[in-house]
Image: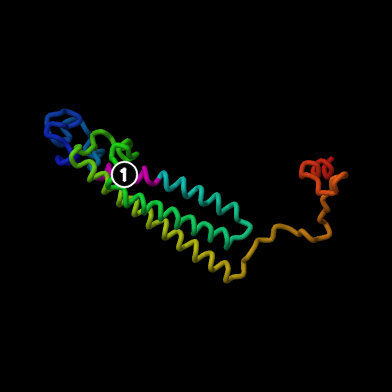
Amino acid sequence: MVASWLHEPGSCAVCSSHEVRRPECGVDAKRLVGPMEAIERAAFISVGRAYGFAGLAIVCIMFSFSFSPPFATLIGATLCCLAAFVLFLHALTARRRPYRRTETWLILPKENHPRAEIAQQVIGEVLRQTYLRFSRDALLIAAGLLAFSLVLRLAGVDELPLGDHAGAGHQHLPTHPLSGDPASVVEWRLRAYP
């Protein structure tokens, strides 16, 4: 149910006659979400989406170093620590950031908007807690990646074998006819696969 401290008296979004939504207004009571839960959900979606995109970028960077799994996991741990630090900085400034400029405010349904007098305090505190939660999660992931990197190094995994570069079946790259420099990859492919 919508708490009375969030709305002016007589501001029921359905009938405008009382402070709190009631089932007799035609609103399904099972579908009602409390205002703090709605604000927390909006903050979680807002911060979680950005965190998810950062996580995707970290995974892509780790994948680019997949030739060396210990190094890839070390890079991932470092980037997760960086993400945790950025989230922590956002948590420090969350209470001062204007609430109307946050994505949380834009996501939040209008019936769950707190009154202007307390909106800055409520939205700022919920965002601060959400940033700290995701920052803690990023540090836990970084610790896991760092531990996995150490396990891989202790197991002797340095690089994955990518093929036999010195074997008998290895073709020598053709050289440019005038300069003697190795030919471009395109020229080599054209010569190798006519």
Give left or right: position of 170 versus 57: right
Instruction: Quarter of the image for the N terminus: give it.
Output: top left
**Which residue is at 37% across, 46% downward?**
47
Question: Is residue 38 inside the magenta stretch?
Answer: yes
Q: Which amino acid lies under the numbered mark 1 shown in the image of this protein?
A: Arg
**Which residue is at 76% across, 45% downward?**
185
Residue 80 place in picture, x, y as percent:
46, 56
Residue beneath label 1, please?
A: 41
Give left or right: position of 65 versus 174: left
The residue most toward the front is 179
146 relative to 8, above or below: below
Q: Which residues are magenta?
A: 36-48
Q: How is the image coloured?
A: rainbow
Give left or right: position of 86 versus 70: left
Q: Quadrant of residue 119?
A: top left
Name the chief secondary structure element in magenta: helix
